[in-house]
Amino acid sequence: MSHLKLFTLISLLGLGKLTTNELQLQQSADGLLTLWLDHSSGISSDFLIGSANKTVNLLPFVNLDLILIAAKNCSNINGFQEYDPAQSDWWSFSNDKWNSQLEVSPFSRMPQYFRGSMIRDSFCPKNGTKECVTNETEKHTTFFLVTEVNGTLNIGNNDGILGLAPSQREGFKSYLDILKEQGRIIRKSFSYKYDKDTPRMVFGDFDEESRSVSFEKLPTRDGDLIYGAKILHYEFNGVEIDFGTNSYFTFEPSISYNLFLIRDQQVFNATITKLNETLQSMNEHSMLLGDGEALVPFFKGMTCKDAQLYTSTFKIDLRGIILEPNLFAISNDVFNNCIMRMGFVYNPNLTEGVDNLYIMTGETLGDTVLSINFDSEELVLAGGYAKKGAIIRLWGWIAIISGIFLLIAIIGFVVHKVRQGKLSRRLDQYETIQQ
């Protein structure tokens, strides 16, 4: 089966080991909840689960509404695997119909199958507020306890996935659903801020002051949703690259490589040819390197600094928000070679109606803050690499046109008053002469 099965994209070309020491959740009084994340070669956080307060380490995943946790001794998952329902006094089976087998495939060619059960237990971020560590069943969280995986769920040394999307499954509440229902956040949204020392997600937060773009809910083959914003065009080092008519942007904080999934074989071939030409124009020692499925920009025998990538940019236009990260910031030196953290993949089973899907990593943001509001279906990129584009929203045009008409009306009114004054003076003069 394809190595692009669910979540292998998280470790494409190596995720690295994640450390998980002393993480916390900070509750503020204004309906915001800050989840501090750990950064090594990915983004993750510790949670306490069950009455025994066992620790599980989870990767946040934007385009999934489920919490997936590996059971103790689960095959094919390389995590701590400390959670065993038999050691918890509070767990119970969920009344949800999703039991026994689960199929998920947000980005993959083939669906990933999990065996296990939907269960409920206490679930609380480690070292945060302990109000979620409780024996009260109504405050418990529903998650899928994975006992077996068809294939390898390659998520580094982690125990599972913290799905952030609103639930699309009958009778099931996602993590953001639960937080909002408990009154701990004011909306189903989050802001993400990348920082090498203290990366964080603020649940309930949304930047309402900056320009936003709407995102679309793109259904996958198994009924899941991908939350994607339409891309007008790409530029790679100043050269426009055509990925097809319908290109979309989405975000996954925990993956290590930016991924470009392309549905059409001819478009994929043409894109690879154009990229190779562009890379060659940058440096004659550059190429796209890979195994035929995932191709990665590679500079042979030189460091990324020597390849002068700090003067090169990658640009995407999201209908008025332009993101332009420096290529040097998303590249690594590996044994005197330079590799860009970009993977170009041919995927014929991509969501219908989507020619290209760009999945951006958290690290690529740099100082840019990303906000997603699931309630209003809006996305904001502000500060850092994000810039305002030339596109003006409809209300902007209406405001401009209204302003022009108002200005014309004012000028017309002034001219009318001037003429009326002149006419009045002439009439006064005429009446004086007549007298």
Image (cartoon, grey):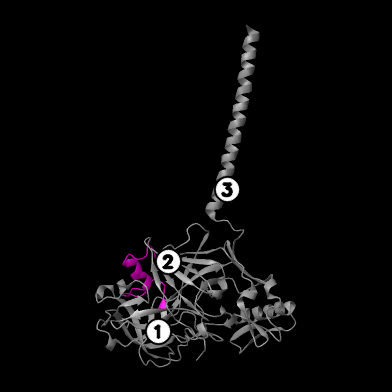
Q: Which segment did they paint magenta?
A: 162-189
Mark 3: amino acid: Ile
Determine if the magenta segment contains residue 20: no
The residue beneath circle 1 is 103
Q: Secondary structure at mark 3?
A: helix
Q: Reading the chain from its start, which is encountered first: label 3 or label 2?
A: 2
Between marks 2 and 1, how big is the CA–CA gap?
Answer: 26 Å
Q: Quadrant of the C terminus?
A: top right
Q: Secondary structure at mark 2?
A: strand
Q: Which mark is residue 189?
A: 2
Is 288 left or right of 348, judged from the image as shown? Answer: right
The residue beneath circle 3 is 400
Residue closest to the eye, 352 or 284: 284
**How far from the left and from the top, in percent, is residue 112?**
44, 86
Q: Count of labels shown? A: 3
> Image quarter for residue 374?
bottom left
Q: Residue at x 64, y 8 (%)?
A: 434
**Could you classify mark 3 by the number of other residues whose Cα lies within 10 Å: few (under 14), some (14-19), or many (20 or more)?**
few
Mark 1: amino acid: Glu
**How far from the left and from the top, in percent, is residue 188?**
40, 66
